[in-house]
Image: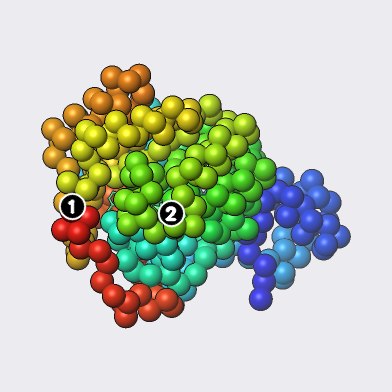
Amino acid sequence: MKVNLLDFDRAALERFFASIDEKPWRARQVLRWIHQRGAADFDAMTDVAKSLRARLAETAEIRLPELAGDAVAADDTRKWLLKVDAANSVESVFIPEKGRGTLCMSSQAGCVLDCAFCSTGKQGFNRNLSSGEMVAQLWIANRALGRKQGAERPITNVVMMGMGEPLLNLDALIPALRLMLDDDAYGLSRRRVTVSTSGIIPGMDRLAEECPVALAVSLHAPDDELRERLVPVNRKYPIRDLLAACRRYLERAPRDFITFEYVMLDGVNDRDAQARELLRIAARVRCKFNLIPFNPFPGSSFRRSSPERIRAFAAVLQRAGLTVTTRKTRGDAIDAACGQLAGDVTDRTRRTARPARIPIVELNA
Ligand code: SAH
Ligand code: SF4
């Protein structure tokens, strides 16, 4: 099979060019054609020598997933469904805001981690996405959104907050991140690319080493007992170790704080006393909090905390001097909000055969 140039960051593309006896500097030209000008075939690359174009066409291609859906909500949030193979589709979402545009991207078809409140987790897991399948999400969004002459690029920020756990797919994630940061590709600043993790400690250490970008950690609970129920991987990586890993990450990070994400679940993790417990965590790591009102999906048993409860919870943190933002719910009619991205995943873990998850009553007790 031909190699997919979307899989290659600059270094890999240069190696590939060397392997076909071409000058590595030509890689730069091709990188720009693919990622900045949205070329999907070699004929379009008019300033590349014809002989090289012919050579490339024999051995390589720019292979994109099939676009299986494209929906725009009333608030201009836009969602794409990409069919990555016969059995799996993944989603990415563009969220326009004043002065910036954020693309939320997927890293896996499904997720093994099975967080209690997550639609992706409920679907089970099929496979990792390749670097090219991650980059394709950005390529497709970039092309669809167009770029007005002289205007800001439509996509100024990327968040790895779609389907999947990015730090369980680091081999593919890192080249994709490098292309996001490369000035000859997407040219985003490290501070504007955010990886969100449920707290995979070895992955955090490796990311810090190989490609430090902004980091968001899905905390969701102030103590191990509750966090284990909501984010089962906490059994492997408990809060204490997670906080130590956050501190290590900050030594390399482009920002001087970790963003803690905290999904607001009515009666489960949203009491004032729990906010006060979070202050003890905040005293140990430089952080900001991002409260995410829970987004229901078919079959979910949680309820979203009321706006008043969320405000009161935020106020406890703010009175202690913490920066707290509350995520606005966007793209409601097209199911594009956090945790609603489901795509279409063939579950190889046969999760449906497993016992039902913890009911909300038990969590309330
Ligand atoms: N696997 C990574 C990144 C993808 S999830 C992680 O867990 O961090 C991105 C964010 O959406 C996480 O903070 C996750 O906890 C949150 N999320 C998942 N399901 C949600 C839901 N139903 N409502 C609101 N947020 C949700
Ligand atoms: Fe996976 Fe993140 Fe969903 Fe948890 S919240 S199941 S880690 S995608």
For this orientation, the residue located farthest to the right is 21
- Please report whichever mark, 1 or 2, sits nearer to the chain's N-terminal start: 2
Q: Name the image quarter holding the N terminus.
A: bottom right
Residue 274 at x, y = what percent?
A: 27, 37
Give the residue displayed 52% in from the left and 63% down from the top: 129
Q: Does the residue labelled 2 lie within 8 Å of ligand 2?
A: no
Q: Is 360 on the left-hand or right-hand side of 276?
A: left
Residue 173 at x, y = what percent?
A: 57, 54
Give the residue displayed 34% in from the left and 51% down from the top: 225
Q: Is 231 on the left-hand or right-hand side of 73?
A: right
Residue where numbered disc 1 is placed:
364
Q: Is mark 2 on a helix, strand or loop?
A: helix
Residue 319 at x, y = what percent?
A: 28, 19
Residue where numbered disc 2 is placed:
234
Can see residue 179? no
Depth check, front residue: 248 or 222: 222
